[in-house]
Amino acid sequence: MKKLIVIGCLVVFVLMSACGNPKYRPDKEQDDHIEHSSQELSEILEMLDQQLITANQQFALNIYQALGNHASEENVFISPLSISLALAMTYNGADGETKENMANILQLDGMTVEEVNKGYATLEKIINASDPNVELSIANSLWSRKGLEFNEDFMQRNKNFYNAEANILDFSNSNAANTINKWVDQNTKGKIKEIIKGPISEDTILFLINAIYFKGDWTQSFNEKLTSDQEFHLSDGTTIQHPLMSQSGSYDYLENELFQAIRLPYGKEEHLSMLIFLPAEDSDLTKFHSMLTMDNWNSWMAQFKMSKGSFQMPRFKLEYEATLNDALKSLGMTAPFESSKADFNNMITGPFKVYIDSVKHKSFIEVNEIGTEAAAVTSVEAAITSARTEPDNFFNMTVNRPFFFTIMNEPSDTILFMGAIEIPKQ
């Protein structure tokens, strides 16, 4: 048995640092650049297929819910965009029932492969053009085993639409894994140093790698002098002492009988933001997750409005890792995992039978007064065989109990990251 490893690696790195930010240009030059960027972004947005926007949102909610461990009182953090991009590149090699199965799970029914690829190419342009004061970029690469012949259309589509750097590598060389890991390290600014553990198996024939890098500041940073240790109430009824950051001002805000929610933007143009949802005191994350549907999500997004208030949230850091096979299968993506049913004939030439062996996801995030630092990696592995008293409108939101959050690219309504913090750690 030989193995085909398809690695989809998305890394979003958000680092807010007073000394690490790019220097701003003089105001006139800055304004001219922003005006040009906004016009460019508006033009690109007109080309983005609305179905792809909806597909990414629905898939994000589905894969998050399908993990099925939200009642385990453990922190959860994933990048749905990382997962969808990894699977989308793999999708270019699928055919028959496998292709239909993947399209259904990725919510791409009715779209041709070309429309899917053009949609993701446009999405990458939107992400890259989001904010001149925030660094946000996507990099893709393919690493194929020397001596094997892959379908030319499959390779070319990944080059043309995902701007994937194609590399032929001698996997038997002891430095092969280091070569791939060096690319990952460079394109994640050192946040993920290793995705391939060498030596590479003689059965491995291909790696697909995707990386996203993001660096920016909170639009309104937290004053470290206002951070203080306070009680954080855990789901089991106990409490811990944990640093809560504080600020006040005007925010996009939503409050109902179920939860409070707030949008914290990044950068000058506020095209990227963190959304935090705090279940009501008589509710919890389990109940909130049960309401996390596409209809509710769209309804909530339309109800945010600018409000004045005070806000507190914990500093936190976490690392998360999960194998997504069962989650994807529970959504109905079964054919790609079955060697007897999987059809990836559009991926490689020759009498081979390709199927997905595993999909793994790793992520990291740290949130503090200055900003957010986050990273995520998704790997798709396939096997191949020869067959206080304030005015009434002033809100107070204290995130001192388990909460849900996302990091979003606002122009494209794309969820870059999403997760839940049961126990904040630092």
Image (cartoon, rainbow, N blue to C red):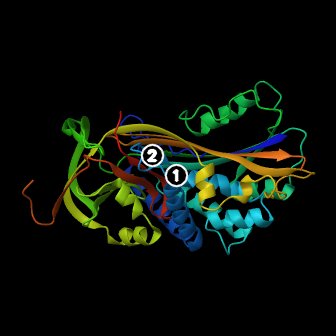
Question: What residue would you read off at disc 1?
Answer: 67
Q: Position of residue 164 (x, y in %)?
A: 71, 50
**Above or below — where is 9 with respect to 338?**
above
- Look at label 1 and name its amino acid: Leu
Tell me the SS state at disc 1.
loop
Residue nearest the observer in this picture, 204 or 306: 204
From where the camera sits, is residue 36 visible? yes
Task: Quarter of the image for the N terminus: give it.
Answer: top right
Q: Position of residue 336 (x, y in %)?
A: 73, 56
Instruction: Kindly identify the residue that appears in the image at 63 percent across and 49 percent down.
Output: 325
Callout 2 touching callout 1 (CB < 8 Å): yes
Q: Is residue 183 left or right of residue 364?
A: right
Q: Is residue 176 left or right of residue 386?
A: left
Give the quadrant of residue 236.
top left
Residue nearest the observer in this picture, 300 or 231: 231
- Look at label 2 and name its amino acid: Val
Q: Is residue 323 left or right of residue 232?
A: right
Give the quadrant of residue 117.
bottom right
Q: Is residue 37 left or right of residue 219?
A: right
Question: What residue would you read off at disc 2?
Answer: 76
**Above or below — where is 202 with respect to 333?**
above
In the orientation shown, which residue stands out farthest toward the right?
351
